[in-house]
Image: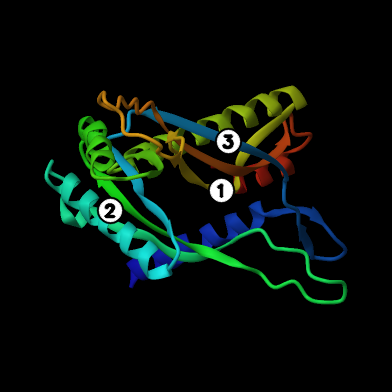
Amino acid sequence: MKRKASLFMVVTLFCVVIWVGAQAEPLDGNEYAVTEPSTLTVGGRGEVSVAPDRATLRLGAVAQAEKASEAQSQVNQVVQNIIKGIQSIGVADKNITTIDLSIYPVYGNQQPEPQGQTTQPVIRGYRASNIIRVQIEELESLGGVIDAGLNAGANRIEGVSFGLKNDGEFRAQALRLATEEADAKANAIARAMGVEIVGIKQISEAGTSLVRPQMDSGPVFSARAAATPVQAGQVRVEASLTVSYYIIDAEPPDSDTNTVSSAYSK
């Protein structure tokens, strides 16, 4: 019974301290108004650069023929040869995905119609496209995969992008750097303005992102005799956030302000 009574007294005392600490300005009678300290809001940004350990290659074939079925048949045959070629040097089937398969008409020049008559479009043929995405887990094999695709008949390379197999660790590092930058900014501003940071009101994460090195894309007009050299560069992992801090005057004029600052302290 004594233990319950002691616990009740401690909890009651704690609530009274918090309630009193949150009061700052007395009103008429026994009422009080809760005043919240002013806030200072700053942004922080962090960036980590790391060597990529995976690549994504997009390549395939484009063909034009008089009939749609002919154009499609041509690109399908080329892409089948591409897949066989890159599988022969170790690319797993699970790392090959079709990402674009399209056929559309090609319109030719039109003869002007007599005045008052509608000009009808003239279809000169059909163009078909078949593009696959190849996930490459070992960067040193990227050049060989490109060459195998070209030797198999690929006439279109949409591009190469580089990334990370596991980026969680680097995202966390970027967030820590963003937090440190925000904290440094806030303290510098507080010193310059003659105020004191007494707590954090809110933290908003804007997000993290990967900035991937890219290779230019475009049609391939002829196969290369030499092996394709590839430089992966660096992947940038970026993070940004916004932090709102509670601030008060650096030298509070009275004890009431000290009580308020303690209620919002870290």
Amino acid of disc 2: Val
Q: CA distance from mark 1 to mark 2?
A: 44 Å
Label 1 secondary element: strand
Q: Is residue 68 left or right of residue 22?
A: left
Q: Is residue 85 left or right of residue 185?
A: left
Q: Quadrant of residue 77?
A: bottom left
Q: Earlier in the sequence, mark 1 or mark 2?
A: 2
Q: In this figure, which residue is indicated by the disc labeled 2?
A: 78
Amino acid of disc 3: Gly
Q: CA distance from mark 3 to mark 2?
A: 50 Å
Q: In this figure, which residue is indicated by the disc labeled 1?
A: 206
- Find out whether the residues at labels 3 and 2 contact each other: C-beta distance under 8 Å: no
Q: Nearer the viewer, residue 222 or 7?
A: 222
- Find out whether the residues at labels 1 and 2 contact each other: C-beta distance under 8 Å: no
Q: Earlier in the sequence, mark 3 or mark 2?
A: 3
Label 3 secondary element: strand
Task: Identify the residue shown where x is 52% and y is 58%.
Answer: 14
Q: Residues within 10 Å of mark 3 (few under 14, many from 20)?
A: many
Q: Is residue 89 left or right of residue 109?
A: left
Query: Which numbered disc, 3 or 2, marks the residue closer to the eye?
Result: 2
Task: Identify the residue shown where x is 85% and y is 60%.
Answer: 27
Q: CA distance from mark 1 to mark 3?
A: 10 Å
Q: Nearer the viewer, residue 183 or 158?
A: 158
Q: Quadrant of residue 230?
A: top left
Q: Earlier in the sequence, mark 1 or mark 3?
A: 3
Q: Which mark, by number, is residue 44?
A: 3
Relative image position of residue 154 (x, y in whole percent): 32, 45
Relative image position of residue 16 (x, y in whole percent): 59, 60
Query: Which numbered disc, 1 or 2, marks the residue closer to the eye?
Result: 2
Q: Residues within 10 Å of mark 1 (few under 14, many from 20)?
A: few
Q: Is residue 105 left or right of residue 72?
A: right
